[in-house]
Amino acid sequence: MRMYDIIVKKRDGGELTEEEIYFFIEGYTKGEIPDYQASALTMAIYFQGMSQKETATLTQAMVDSGETIDLSQIEGHIVDKHSTGGVGDKVTFIVGPLVASVGVPVAKMSGRGLGHTGGTLDKLESIEGLQIEMTKEQFINNVNQHKLAVAGQTGNLAPADKKLYALRDVTATVDSMPLIAGSIMSKKLASGADSIVLDVKTGSGAFMKSLEDSEALAREMVNIGNNLGRHTVAVISDMNQPLGYEVGNANEIKEAAQILQGKKVMDLRELSLEIAAHMTLLAEVFSSYEEAYQALEANLENGKAFNALRTLIEAQGGNVDMIDDLNKLPQAKYAVEVKADTDGFVKEIDAESIGVAAMYLGAGRATKDDEINHGVGITLHKKIGDKVTASEPLVTLHSDQEQPEASISKVKEAYTIADEKIEAPALIHKVIK
Ligand code: URA
């Protein structure tokens, strides 16, 4: 079998066989297939798509490319969550501690930034000393002891995805339904949780821009999960503007910590409670959605959820002072305001452009080897539906350059101001079980 022929077959719209998919995944994982051929195939998949059968096979091949973690030594029903990726998405830092605070074990394996979206691990590394690489034993011990651990994929967990994820990030092949489904579900299946809640983003800042495509992706992943014995629920949530008001690594940690201290940033708080409620329902600790929601909301107010975040940071070697005093988190040198040109109401905020503007500041990677700058980012002052007057700041850029021109023009491009008032888009579009 030759990789060349597999590329030609997919380029021309053919359906790959199980043998061909395994040949690609095994060969690429071992380093026998070079990046340029893997890029050509992922680009062909991007344009031609994959059948449900191909996607399921791709997922299983990626699971089989490495070890699977046996989490049976963890007591209780283990839940995991995963987002398809958005801008300002710091939900993991809120729901992890929140769900752990009601006694449900959360074993979360996370990834780095992808495309215009930030990565959970990059954000966590804003906290000095925090370790995201750990052995399986440490991971299991931490979950048993503290009900929560957030770690990078271990070397042998879905290694095919680890390689492909980094390649797709720099070859414009992220936003493909079968590649996203395979990437997410292979990690989730290999990492051993009993149940999974997927946060499938839809809109301008998501990889799937239309509700139709997002729903198809959600259904595909829920089917793969349920067929392979993991109870899987998908929440389709809006990403037509960044989530919350902060974008960037330290910025997002700060906003998440504030939510856990009871701050009412409504979209972020509401989505976090929704995802957390489904996680606890899957773990069967509450008998109804309302009961779950109320218990979780109470823990945002009474400090229990915030304490669970502190515990996570301490357990993983991080400097907890940075969370107790959020001014100690990394900060950029300059605060540069981008102002509105006219009066009116915010009609649209192209979330992808905001993500790209943050990447230009240094919050994300343009190439595989780029270093992340944890202190830079964007604070939004205006969201969809808000009234603005000319010269009012739309955002503040936290930058290490005095005049970050590329980011300024990207932010200007992102905002559309209209004369008439616009309603903010619905936050939760659908829940797929
Ligand atoms: N998140 C992942 O883990 N993989 C993708 O492909 C997209 C988002």
Image (spheres, rainbow, N blue to C red):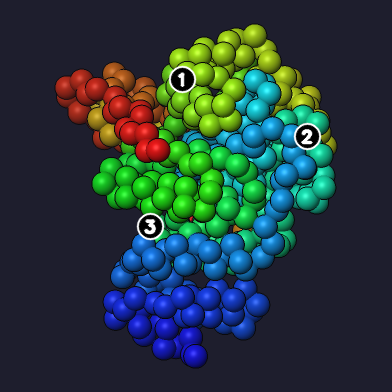
User: Mark 2: which amino acid?
Assistant: Asn
Question: What is the CA distance from the residue labelled 2 to the residue labelled 3?
Answer: 35 Å
Q: Which mark is residue 144?
A: 2
Disc nearest the viewer among 1 and 3: 1
Left or right: residue 249 compared with residue 392? right
Question: What is the CA distance from the residue labelled 2 to the residue labelled 1?
Answer: 26 Å
Q: Which mark is residue 289?
A: 1
First in sequence: mark 1 vs mark 3: 3
Question: What is the CA distance from the residue labelled 1 to the residue labelled 3?
Answer: 30 Å
First in sequence: mark 2 vs mark 1: 2
- Eyeballing the image, is 375 above or below 110? above
**Position in image of residue 373 (x %, y %):** 64, 46
Q: Which mark is residue 69?
A: none
Around disc 1, counting alpha carbons within 10 Å, would you say few (fewer than 14), some (14 to 19), or many (20 or more)?
A: few
User: Mark 3: which amino acid?
Assistant: Met
Q: Residue tagged by mark 3?
A: 177
Marks 3 and 1: in contact by CB < 8 Å?
no
